[in-house]
Image (cartoon, rainbow, N blue to C red):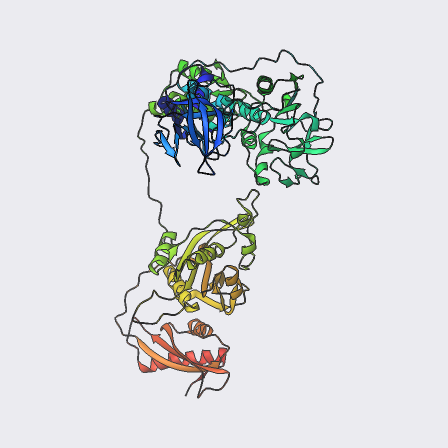
Amino acid sequence: MKVSQNWLTEMLGSALDTERVLERLTLAGLEVDGHETIDAVDKVVVAKVTGVQQHPDADRLRVCDVNDGQETHQIVCGAPNVRPDMTVALAQVGAKLPGGIKIRKSKLRGVESAGMLCSAAELGLGQDHDGILDLPSELVVGSPLHEALGLPDTVIDIDLTPNRGDCFSTLGVAREVATFCDIAFDEPSAEPCADRSGSPVSPKIDTPEVVPVFSAATVTGIDSAAKTPLWMVERLRRSGVRAISPVVDITNFVMLEFGQPMHGYDLDKVQGELGVRYADGEESLVLLDGKTITPDKETLVITDDSGAIGLAGIMGGESTMVDEHTTNVLFEAAHFTPSVMAGKARRYNMHTDASLRFERGVDAYGHERAQERAAQLLIEIAGGVVGPLFVERHTAHLRSRDAVVLRAARLAKVLGCDVASDEVTKIFERLGFGVAMSNGDWHVSPPTWRFDIAIEEDLIEEVARVYGYDRIPVKRTYAETPLAPASEQRVSEELLRDAMAARGYAEAVTYSFVDPRRHALLDIAAPGPELLNPISSELSVMRGTLLCGLLEAAQYNLARQRQHVRIFEIGRVFDGDRETVKMAGLLAGKRHHEQWSSKDSDVDFFDIKADLEALLATTGRSSAVRLERTQIDTLHPGQAARISLDDEDIGVIGALHPRVSSAFDIDNACIVFEIDVDAAFARRIPIAAPISKFPHVRRDIAIVIDEKIAVADVVDTIKKARSALIRDVIVFDVYQGKGIEPGLKSVALGLILLDSSRTLTDDVSEAVVADVVTALQDSHSAKLRE
């Protein structure tokens, strides 16, 4: 929100110190993003072009005779819009313009020039370089330009929070300045127009529950050739609004002045009765910007007998717009319930000044003032006759303004200090609140323009910011902060992060909402709930898997020539109303960073399998982990496995399917895993045991089994049937080829035998090996290899 300090000064009727205003606004919670001072420029005057001739040696230059009220000067000008009898801004010799340009007598292509005709940009009034400033003809020739433009001035840029919709106007900011600078302030009013004649307008309101206030008035017989006065053009420009025509400029001016959005219709183009209703979902509407839309059934529209003629509270329609031929005008101002307006402009990819204000709340009792002000301004500028004012207000559908109770004890407790009762009462009165005392507490009635006051805490905030945050004493608080218990039954997420970082992985933090089309490519999990109000269509569902975000992060890095990508994430995924913490990892690109001593190769399944095994080893239960080959569309056939722990499914691991890689624009080999954190990282509590004093014994055997039997099944059989003397099983060779029948394979196993109470004899060791061989023969039809 941009506000002119001169405009504030005029409304408050009191001179303002710029630095004090900036400081107090920031302390009031209206953060000042910046300010721009527009200085008055000496020796720049209003002048009249009395003659224009072509430059003898330059096609784009003209030689102008310019009168400054005392004498006529010869000025060489290159502006395309210069013409005889034009009122212009003349920078006389000796003037110093913004930007450091100093005006001197000079020759342009052999012709003398004694000054310069200025554009708005050259005067620091805007960015318009297209031509010289075309001033109103009624300005006095020879008068200083800064008097006509109301300079010097300071434009204050305020960053408003969504709850302070009342400050989206000069009036709202003036109220805050008056409160914080302790200036007596009377609410501005607009005197009713003395002569109201003609036919009254009686709009039809079909939805009073969401349009509780609607007003309309006409001004007929205006001068269509009238121009917006310079003072209004300048105030609009300093507020960031471009001047268009008197009717449009007046509606924008009143909106900026009082915060009430208005719309001006060409009365002759309105067919029949004006109205407000919900769209039927089928009618087409061409807006002022030329865009054609079909409003849905949840959108309010302004109508006449021809159908929809505007989006209520957002933008008017092209069919009833005012133009250079308009002589009869209909002004409309309404109050739309903020909850109904929220998000509607964004639904149609629009953002307008009107929708910004209606979404945050507009004073439901300021319509008469806005209508009277607009009518008076239009009559002053373009003449005409004002018609009767129509105002329909359904108070039953307006927000209740019941008093909010502020307890003195609660105020003191929250602020941490005592504020005098009289001072609190004065603060509320300065804010325009109604206040009454009862049993030492305040019963406060917020004004109609303050939509953000609803509970006791809101009143405490008002007292704090007006009293002054800098006046509230600093009190140090003390509290016991015992350390949270560290359970040995779970591996902490911090330890998991450290373990992954130690293996060269970088942690990623991706969005919890993802693109539903990309998520559909990952059949590892279904997407979570759909968002009701997404940031964009590409971020419209909650993730059911972490891999969607990791794949996008990998693609981003690979596309920027990162050849070695190792990333992981720990985060929540969503399945309906249930949330689960999962951990996912991704390897892509090269196995190692480039070096001179060895050739590098792409990562493969076994690289990430080793990382996962190291991660699961932190639980002390790695021997209970199994990988079973499976078929998942997301993963490459033959390189996909389910991960189980004690026969419980905890996740998946595998190489990304080429079809999925292509959809994510990944050309490199990409290996991934995802596991359930709660299921996977329940730790086995360690139990201390003495180290055996006796040596272990190793016995190696080689068995021949069917090639379809998994080696893991063989190891499981040994562990289930083993003697207490078998401490470990090592698989050190798997062989198929010469000497082994087709369809079979040889598996070499190392059995580690140990007895903590004695040294094992050969007889005992051979007996254990014989038991193992028997178990393998019974379970897998295994044969000892000769």
Q: Is residue 466 visible?
A: yes
Q: Is residue 740 left or right of residue 285?
A: left
Q: Quadrant of the C terminus?
A: bottom left
| Above or below: residue 72 compared with residue 740 | above
| x 31%, y 61%: residue | 688
Q: Position of residue 301 (x, y in %)?
A: 66, 33
Which of the 4 quarters of the picture holds residue 766?
A: bottom left
Q: Position of residue 203 (x, y in %)?
A: 70, 24
Q: Position of residue 57 (x, y in %)?
A: 44, 38
Extreme-left residue of the structure: 693
703 and 354: which is toward the camera: 354
| Above or below: residue 730 compared with residue 383 | below
Q: Position of residue 160 (x, y in %)?
A: 46, 30
Q: Is residue 484 left or right of residue 667?
A: left
Q: Is residue 205 visible?
A: no
Extreme-front residue of the structure: 56
| x 42%, y 54%: residue | 569
| x 44%, y 68%: residue | 605
Which of the 4 quarters of the picture holds residue 729?
A: bottom left
279 and 565: which is toward the camera: 279
The tally of labels here is: 0
89 and 563: which is toward the camera: 89
166 and 95: which is toward the camera: 95
| Above or below: residue 624 compared with residue 53 | below
